[in-house]
Image (cartoon, helix red, strand yellow):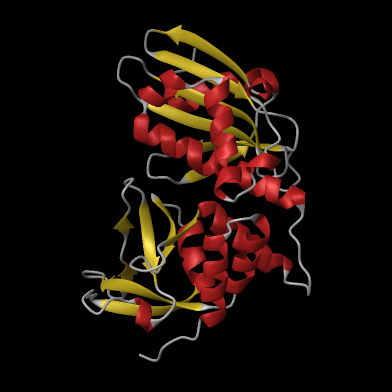
Amino acid sequence: MNDIDNSKLEEAMQAYVDDPVKDKLIQLVFALQNTKLFVPARPVQNKGGFQPYIVKNGEGSLYMPAFTSIKKIPADQKYQGMLKLQYKQCVSMLLDHPTLVQGIVLNPFADNLMLKTQMLELSRKADQIGQPKAYKMKTDDFRMIVRHTAEFRLIPEKLNAQKMEFISSLSEEVLCGLYEAPYAETGQKEQFPYQAGDFEIMELSVRDDLSIMQVITPSKYLYQTNCRELYFVWNPLTGQTGYYTIEKAPDKDEKNYYLDVFKEDGSWERLEEAPSDGNIMNRVMELFGGGI
């Protein structure tokens, strides 16, 4: 298999690792756009074709490994197959078919650079925009993407992993910390625009087997695909949990808000147009399986 010349990408990777600030992140995003990567894969039994390997890091998170060149693959690391894929194909595999895999890890035995879901979303948006000679990501776009990351990845991941422990710990401060995390990961913590007091929580015990928590999220910087409200529902007797959101519709849609549900496998589904304000809680409990 012929090697790939990814020297410019590797330079951008190193620059970001050395100084993980917003400008270096944007440079890395554009360095990735038109590259190809080596992706280890194994045959799919009885179906033909190959599927990528998945690895787990020290924290238990799942990633798809990819290599920027043959020399980055250790000689003693044997794989059944190796795919040469466009980076954009790798992004589509993870974003268009949501699973518990949380991103791509580049050169896991050398650079070990993790491209988490928010990075993949950022690179897809940058690809749609195109790269002018001097591109600088708009602050509004950045805020939209990192808020989406908290609401569509970090919060459901925590809930699915910790269940009732997570719900018991929920507070304005905890939620604010989850919204702040993507800013910290991209070196923009000082740009975080919210405080704990910007979140409102109301918890209601409906029956012995049904409780619900409504979270009103900050109205400041609420963009398309961001959530106006979050709903956590649970059965205290069985420990079953659910997570629903009221998502602001994309600008191209005629609807204003959608009701979404998040599943334990890490995927989510846009269910329907959001009910009127007074009916949302009842609809969420009905979907969960225990209306009043």
Asked if residue 96 shows in the view, the reply is no
Which residue sits furthest bottom? 2
Quarter occupied by the N terminus: bottom left
Residue 52 coordinates in the image, percent (x, y): 34, 68
Q: Is residue 73 visible?
A: yes
- Residue 182 shown left or right of residue 264 in the figure: right
Q: Nearer the viewer, residue 109 or 234?
A: 109
Residue at x 48%, y 31% (from the top left corner): 243
Q: In this orientation, which residue lies closer to the viewer: 289 or 115?
A: 115
Question: Relative to the observer, which residue lies in front, 68 or 289?
Answer: 68
Q: Position of residue 189 (x, y in %)?
A: 63, 42
Question: At which x and y percent is residue 172?
Answer: 58, 21
Residue at 73 percent across and 42 percent down: it is 223
- The residue at 37%/8% (across/down) is 208
Q: Quadrant of residue 180?
A: top right
In the picture, measured across the screen, residue 68 lies left or right of residue 240, that is: right
Foreground pick, 64 / 109: 109
